[in-house]
Image (tube, rainbow, N blue to C red):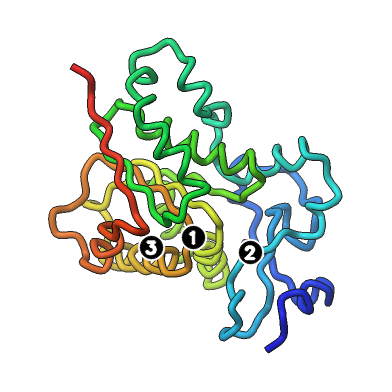
Amino acid sequence: MQNLQDFLSKGNDNKTPISLSSKDHGQIEESINCQQCNDVRFVRLNLPIDHIDFGKAVPCDCVFNESDEEKLDKFQKYSRIGSFESINFDYIKNADFAIAKNLTEYFIDAQNFRTSKLKFLLIQSNSGLGKTLISAAILNDFIENKIPSLFYNSNDLFEQLYSAMNDNTQSYDDFLIKLRSIPLLVIDDLVLHHVSSWALEKFIQLLIYRFDQGLKTVINYIELPEEIDQRIVSRFEDKNQSQKITITQDE
């Protein structure tokens, strides 16, 4: 079996952008600077399906020609973090509002997620208690460490899934590949009661793939359906590889 370094050294013919479309780069740029990755920053290698690195994302050549500041800016734009780009653990710790003060007791588990062996982190709370802030701080911690990440509100994720399916097969495949290969995926405010059975099955398959491949995933939500698919339950409840944080309101 050919090793990964051999593929990396063979030039652009063996590399494909994680997404062939530039329309979902968070903050859309007018032009594409890198034709190899479409400014996504990472490419996937055209490896045999039985290769250990099949489907994994690797840095594009353009990444190595930029300053740290340029890299960080590109990571932030691609991540879709938007207005939450300044939210980190120090910001929350020093913020002068009640929600932030209530979150500091959950910092240890959230801050350790990047370096831990955990695959999934589940964050549950009622509305307005800061689960999105914690999720954003986690993502920004990954970005600060130059780890490509994506932040999706669940409604946006499912809307884009439907849109990509109706667009064309390539667009749909590209979107799924991006979700499946990104090292960190944050799904904000997960709601499933309105999702079609088709979309729900695709979502379940996505989570199963990410869990089995050891790709880190943060999901925050108010509540999940009482009868959720057991394939997901078994992974959510795996105490060695998943953790749940429940944010409660101080009395």
Marks 1 and 3: in contact by CB < 8 Å? no
The residue under the point 47% across, 50% down is 116
**Label 2 element class:** strand
In the picture, the quarter occupied by the N terminus is bottom right
> Which image quarter: residue 211?
bottom left
Q: How many numbered markers are drawn? A: 3
Q: CA distance from mark 2 to mark 3?
A: 17 Å
Q: Position of residue 80 (x, y in %)?
A: 55, 42
Look at the picture and state if 70 lies above or below 127: below
**Residue that label 3 marks:** 207
**Residue that label 2 marks:** 57
Query: Around disc 3, counting alpha carbons within 10 Å, would you say few (fewer than 14), some (14 to 19), or many (20 or more)?
Result: many
In the picture, the quarter occupied by the C terminus is top left
**Residue that label 1 marks:** 215
Query: Which amino acid lies under the numbered mark 2 shown in the image of this protein?
Result: Ala
Between 91 and 105, the residue placed more toward the observer is: 105
Comes first in the chain, label 2 or label 1? 2
